Image (cartoon, helix red, strand yellow):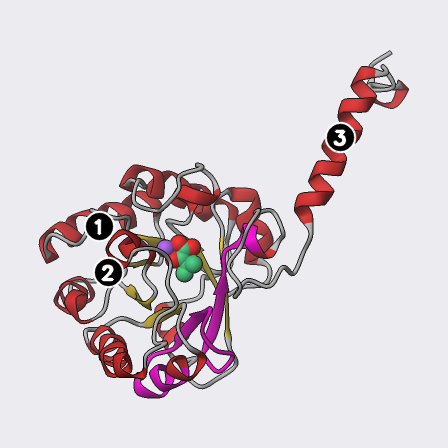
Amino acid sequence: PVKRITVPQIAARKGDVPIVALTAYTAPMAALVDAHAEVILVGDSLGMVVHGLTSTIGVTLEMMILHGQAVMRGSRQAMVVIDMPFGSYEESPEQAFRNAARVMTETGCGAVKLEGGARMAETIRFLTSRGIPVMGHVGLTPQATLTMGGFKTQGRDQDSWPAHIEDARAVAEAGAFSVVVEGVMEALADRITEAVAVPTIGIGASARCDGQILVLDDMLGLSGRVPRFVKKFGDLGPRADEAIATYAAAVRDRSFPAADQTYR
Ligand code: KIV
Ligand code: NA
């Protein structure tokens, strides 16, 4: 069996060749990503991408564990990171440990990710000092959309930069081995990358981050509307539509199944 990429290996990528990260939620998609990426994130974006929720607020620990297990089965070399969902870690360091330990033991994943800056530092220190590797997530934090009033690019006002930089620094100093920087002005992302000793993984951030991540379905062209920061590297949505339409027509005109697909 191939050994998976470790936390120290990711942490050592600061200022090095950029870390390739993508989300995945199922075993077959994890297998595709595993061939090319160092990190597979089982993001709570699965609530919207897979389950049709309008935000990540309704995602449960059970959903994360179920998809985490599938992604672990489908991959063999990448580090699998699983998002802690809304409500599973914010109450106290003890609550966070109890639920993160469930995620770790029931999936065998390599790390968990949780949203929040300075306010989560105590919890991150509690987890990392007890054997749970943590990836941070600062800037635009989707679990806070209700309090933020939507998905808003962060750092448009330069007065807010010190607080954002302090958030990233607090997360890193609390023991996070890397930190996702989402939806921030490019120059702020660069300042954050300079300010922290661990790799930054950008999404809607800057090419100078130490790595990049995208939601797999978005970059494959499987999602409808996507944020400006998503580049569609594929066009699978229209191609799937075409295949399904062709199937429907073949069923209706009885050209499917043909000789090749029937047992005679
Ligand atoms: O849930 C998710 O997919 C994420 C990434 C976009 C960073 O948190
Ligand atoms: Na997430």
The span shown in magenta is: 190-218
Camera-near label (3 vs 2) is 3
Where is mark 1, residue-wise? Answer: 101
First in sequence: mark 1 or mark 2? 1
Mark 2, residue position: 132
Q: CA distance from mark 1 to mark 2?
A: 7 Å
Q: Evaluate if marks 1 and 2 touch, with contact meaning CB atoms under 8 Å apart.
A: yes
Percent from the top left, x then y, of residue 3? 46, 62
List x then y, in percent, for residue 21: 49, 64
Residue drawn at x 44%, y 86% as measured from the top left: 15
Mark 3: amino acid: Ala
Residue 245 disc label:
3
Q: Nearer the viewer, mark 3 or mark 1?
A: 3
Query: Is residue 155 or residue 110 the one in the foreground?
Result: 155
Magenta stretch holds residue 224: no
Looking at the rendering, which quadrant does residue 243 occupy? top right
Task: Give the amino acid type for the residue marked by disc 2 in the picture.
Answer: Ile
